[in-house]
Image (cartoon, rainbow, N blue to C red):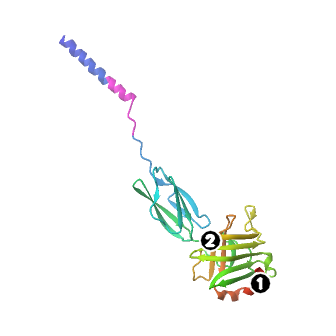
Amino acid sequence: MNKMFKLFALVGVLLVVISCHSCGKDDPLPPTPPEKPIRFSTEQVDLTLENNSTSVTLENFKGTLTQDGQVTGFKVTITGNIIRITAEQYVPGDYTFIFKGNGKSYPLKVRLQKMPEMRLTGVFTSAGEELLPARFTSQKFDQGRVSRFVVSGNQDNPKEQYVLISDMQISGKEISFTLKARGIQKISDGARYLPDGEQRGLKGSIISEPSDAKLRIYAKLSNGKGINILIPNSWSWLSKLSTSLASSTLLFG
């Protein structure tokens, strides 16, 4: 009787062991998945005044993301884990933007590229192509600053093809002005790069330094095209121009 009891007990233990072993095979514990790294979709953001805005994603981040501090000359907009950075002023150089979320910091390198030098006087595309030959140029000063500038491709009949810059208002490295054009034939994307007519309230950036011989402006037209404007920055340049200030004022009002 005692032997039978021991035998049944042994069989019971074996059944429990086999049952547990089978359960382990049928329902294995799932391995813990590795954490996905939180990182920006690009290591460095490169901007120019022509392409002055871009978006970057902080991949695998969930939570509230904020910018730590501000960087002068740039605008930052955050939507979820997507960050949009816009260069609003010409402040070329390398910068580090810091973003914070869930108790951690995420640095992002941003570079605003320096624009290539330009030496000629006149009006040019964003790529530096001349929009019209500067055969007739003149300017007007107000309190020591250029307030009005005209360049024409026809010395005998300046009104046939010209660009007139007026109502210039400069504040630091920013400028607003009115542009009037006629007869500019350059074509881009199937349309004239600079159409005839007047564009008021254009805004741009001052690329040059106060000590430079030319005032250089970069701005975007109402059609989104970029232009470079180079204007002699001092009275000494007037003696080198092909026409006088008086004739310019008479012709263009």
- Camera-side residue of 203 and 51: 203
Q: What residue sits 23% from the left and 15% below the top?
A: 7
Of tags 1 and 2, which is closer to the observer?
1
Q: Is residue 188 inside the magenta stretch?
A: no
User: Residue 19 is drawn in which quadrant?
Assistant: top left
Magenta range is 18-31
Position of residue 21 relative to residue 210, above or below, is above
- Camera-side residue of 28 and 178: 178
- Camera-side residue of 92 and 98: 98
User: Residue 225 is drawn in which quadrant?
Assistant: bottom right
- Chief secondary structure of the magenta portion: helix
Q: How many marks?
A: 2
How many angstroms separate mark 1 from mark 2 (CA)?
Answer: 28 Å
Label 1 Cα crowd, 10 Å radius (few <14 / some 14-19 / many 20+):
few
Q: Could you tell me residue 72's position as x and y percent?
A: 50, 69
- Residue type at mark 1 is Leu
Q: Secondary structure at mark 1?
A: helix
Image position of 77 (left or right of 235): left
Residue at the disc numbered 1? 250
Q: Secondary structure at mark 2?
A: strand
Q: Is residue 25 inside the magenta stretch?
A: yes
Q: Could you tell me residue 243's position as x and y percent?
A: 75, 86
Q: Would residue 130 be seen by someone viewing this image from the given angle? A: no
Position of residue 58 relative to residue 234, above or below, is above
Residue at the disc numbered 2? 204
Q: Would residue 202 be seen by someone viewing this image from the given angle? A: yes
Image position of 184 (left or right of 234): right
- Residue extending farthest to the left is 2
Q: Could you tell me residue 175's position as x and y percent?
A: 61, 74
